[in-house]
Image (spheres, rainbow, N blue to C red):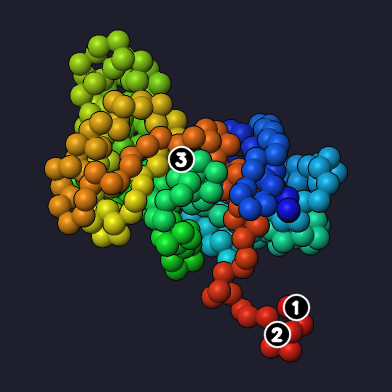
Amino acid sequence: MSRHLGLDVGGTNLKWAVVERDREPRLLKTGRLPTDTAGGEQSVVRQLLVVARTVFSDIEGIESVGVGMPGVLDPDAGVTRFIPNIPGDWDGVHVTRAMTDAIGHPVRLINDARAFTLAEHGLGAGRGATSMLGITLGTGVGGGLILDGHLYFGHEGTAGEFGHQTILPDGPRCNCGNHGCLEALARADAIAAACGQPGVEEAVAAARSGDHRAQQGLRDAGRYLGIGASNVIVLLSVDRVVIGGGVAAAGDMLLDPIQQELERRVHVTDVSRIKVVCGELGIWAGAIGAALHGSSPVPSHAPLPDPTGQAR
Ligand SMILES: [Zn+2]
């Protein structure tokens, strides 16, 4: 049995979770506090260290730390590149190096949607799936891929960017610079606008109470998401699709059009075997996934241990 801490940093909240790994991983404890963004990236990094130290002193036997953050980052180098939704200058910040030195345990960094995917696969709605597409719907549209039982990272951890595939060739401009990305069509504010509502919560409530424009807006978003998921299934033949994030609260109003789109578009594999479901871990998925990432062995493309058997 081993214990691992995961920290999930968002623009508003910093959540943490301790996961116990035996044969099956198990959630031991969670907590959350407002993210300290007063001093930009410096205060966020400092706060991560303070929270980690506090949890280490409260809970015995923690062996590793994982940090999940929204945006572009290099997980092997532990360096952030572009974190648009947390105040600060995040280009080139070594998040893990200072923490590893101060805590004396390995610290690893991961994108928040990849962390969600790891968590739902390990402890949530993706349990038992050999391959899985994880989708996070919120301020942006994130994603992650489990292939043959393992999270697939690709070059510098950039694989799985589900939201940046082109759906409409001449569609609206996306924050990434492309036009017609899925994210530009199905992120929270785009869905809210299509539904004629100020936010996505209001859009879901309006659709539930029978507002036709809101219902159509959610159906369209589900359709775009379904086209995106169809592309992934045709290419990778995943067993399961797990959807999380705030917008997933729309439930069947989103899942039904996604399912219909899969049936319409996927003809190279049996669609009835593919389950499309909402995540089970709620707001803790990111922190749990970060803990799992921190606990996993270093990737095989990292420098190998000294051949004499000495640890690096
Ligand atoms: Zn994009």
Q: Which residue is mark 3?
A: 125
Q: Residue at x 29, y 25 (%)?
A: 253
Q: Position of residue 94 (x, y in %)?
A: 65, 60
Taking the view exactly as shown, the residue that stands out farthest to the top is 209
Q: Residue at x 73, y 53 (%)?
A: 1
Task: Kindly identify which numbered label has been placed on residue 306.
Answer: 2
Question: Where, by quadrant of the figure, is residue 277 drawn?
Answer: top left
The kind of secondary structure element at disc 1 is loop
Q: What amino acid type should be assigned to the residue bearing mark 2? A: Asp
Q: What amino acid type should be assigned to the residue bearing mark 1? A: Ala
Circles 1 and 2, Cβ within 8 Å, touching? The answer is yes
Q: Residue at x 60, y 44 (%)?
A: 288
| Mark 2 vs ligand 1: CB below 8 Å | no
Q: Is residue 234 left or right of residue 292?
A: left
Q: Earlier in the sequence, mark 2 or mark 3?
A: 3
Question: Where, by quadrant of the figure, is residue 35 drawn?
Answer: top right
Q: Which residue is mark 1?
A: 311
The kind of secondary structure element at disc 3 is loop
Give the number of the mark in front: 2 or 3.
3
Vertical placement of residue 85 versus 235, above or below? above
CA gap, disc 1 and disc 2: 6 Å
